[in-house]
Amino acid sequence: MSTQARLRIAARIHYALKHLLGEGIDVAAMLSSPAQAREVLFVCQASGQPELMALAHQYNVACQLAALGKAGARTEAPQDAAWSANTSGFGVTQSAESVLESRHGDLDAAAPRKSWLLKTGWLRRDGAK
């Protein structure tokens, strides 16, 4: 799980302890220090409150999943060419001209552009210039 999930669980622990004991915890310290987190989780387990005990268990699971995520780091999607290693895997982005060429053959530079390509043609229904 992400740090955001642990943050949400720690915030819930903070408010539950504030309601039960009248004093909350330092959420940032709990997230940054494993020793501080361990102390807070011991208090949650010793409280005897089912909600706090469940939150402590959820926090432990979230930490274990985060540790597994770091150990099994994500790998890049396999790509055909070495230069495309940092792409999304859906292919290389193409320019509009190359897409039109592939659909309509070679574009003649002297040929007028289609009316739908011109911004002025967007407002007219007949496409007249």
Image (cartoon, rainbow, N blue to C red):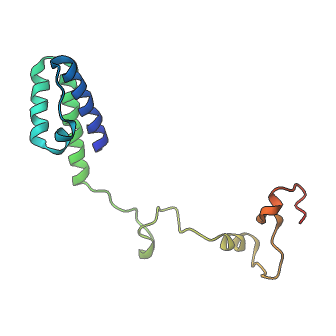
Q: Relative to 94, is 2 above or below?
A: above
* Nearer to the camera, 80 or 57: 57
Residue 76 screen position, x and y as percent: 37, 62
Quarter of the rendering containing residue 58: top left
Residue 92 left/right relative to 65: right
Q: Is residue 34 above or below residue 114?
A: above
77 on left or right of 27: right
Horizontal and vertical percent for residue 68?
22, 48
Residue 63 lies in quadrant: top left
Quadrant of res 61: top left
Task: Report the quarter where the N terminus lies.
Answer: top left
Query: Do we see residue 91 in this rendering?
Result: yes
Task: Estimate the x, y position of residue 6 in percent, counting from the top left.
Answer: 26, 38
Is residue 1 in view from this perspective?
A: no
State the quadrant of the C terminus: bottom right
Residue 116: x and y, percent?
80, 62
